[in-house]
Image (spheres, helix red, strand yellow):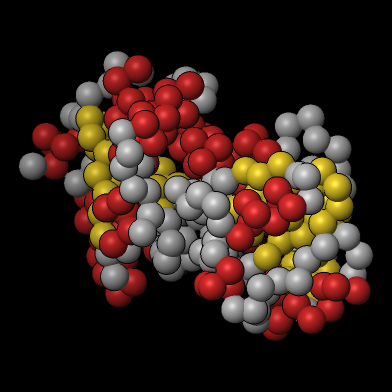
Amino acid sequence: MAELICSRWHLGLLGDDRVLRSPSPLMHLAALKQARLSGHYLPLTLKAENVPPAIKGLAALGFKGLNVTAPHKEVVIPHLTRLSPEAQAIGAVNTLVPDQGGFSGHNTDAPGFAAAYLKERAAQQALIYGAGGAARAVIQALRTQGFSVSVTARNLLAAQKLAQEFGQKALALADLPNAGTYSFVINATSASYAADLNPVPPLTLANNAIVIDLNYGRPDNHWQKLAANSGGLFYDGLPMLAWQACLSFNLWTGANLGITPFSGALAIYLRDGLTLWP
């Protein structure tokens, strides 16, 4: 069994039930085809307590690469052979690469965010809403590009802890109206609609502000309306999703395919009218 699996490029995505609706398999299958590699990319649902034996078992079966998504990006870390400098700095991983009978941990979310949204963009003040794993990758990408970052969240202590760890500053939601206007805002939580935010962050945006919601498949959401009301630009998380997949695939295979097979697969996913998230 192990020999059979080792002869092919078996890849996978570890997470909760949401991985069953992820477009990642479609992207990586397109990349395998373009790279002329035979294999599969499997969505694998796990409970947190099953992560340790799963990591060990998948290594034994010869899986040649894994992605990790919420809620396991931090849970997997104690069970890895080592962390890349990027993953170490962020404190979360999204990519596992075979290493010494196990897996090493990497993070392509931060460089994926930078490639998707920060190319040829001058450094400025940014505001991140959220203090979880996604926010950690975003704050690393922004500070690497010279941005100053403020972090806000419903849990002020979590925002303060994250900001302090990365040498940035935290703001309470109640202080946002008196903290000036914002020209670069990122939602790094799972809440895209006003009804889910509770309370809605009281933001004042500068003209032509850029607003990014790392979620995707959620049209006409609060963040999109916020950008439109300021005459600004709105981006969802699909560009980052494509870039982080491209960078993960390169780590596994050494193949530098560029972004086209990944963004092309996402375009097909959207064109066919499939629901990305509930």
Q: Quadrant of the N terminus?
A: top left
**In the depicted view, which residue is nearer to us: 121 or 244?**
121
Q: Position of residue 192 (x, y in %)?
A: 55, 61
- Quarter placement of the C terminus: bottom left
Tell me the residue at 53%/72% (across/down): 196
- Give coordinates of residue 102: x percent, y percent: 35, 51
Q: Is the residue 190 above or below the residue 40 in the image?
A: below
21 sits to left or right of 74:
left
**Residue at the spot 78% in from the left edge and 66% down from the top edge:** 203
Q: On the picture, is 167 further left or further right than 245?
A: right
Could you say which is closer to the camera, residue 7 or residue 165?
Answer: 165
> Can you give x and y, in whole percent of width and height, for residue 12 in the image?
30, 45
Q: Is residue 3 visible?
A: yes
The quarter holding residue 243 reads top right
Instruction: Tell me which corner region of the image, top left, top right, bottom left or bottom right, holds residue 205.
Output: bottom right
Left or right of 257 on screen, residue 273: left
Residue at the image point whose x is 66% and y is 73% from the top: 200
Residue at position x 54%, y 73% from top?
195
Q: Position of residue 240 (x, y in %)?
A: 56, 41
* In the image, residue 178 above or below residue 69: below
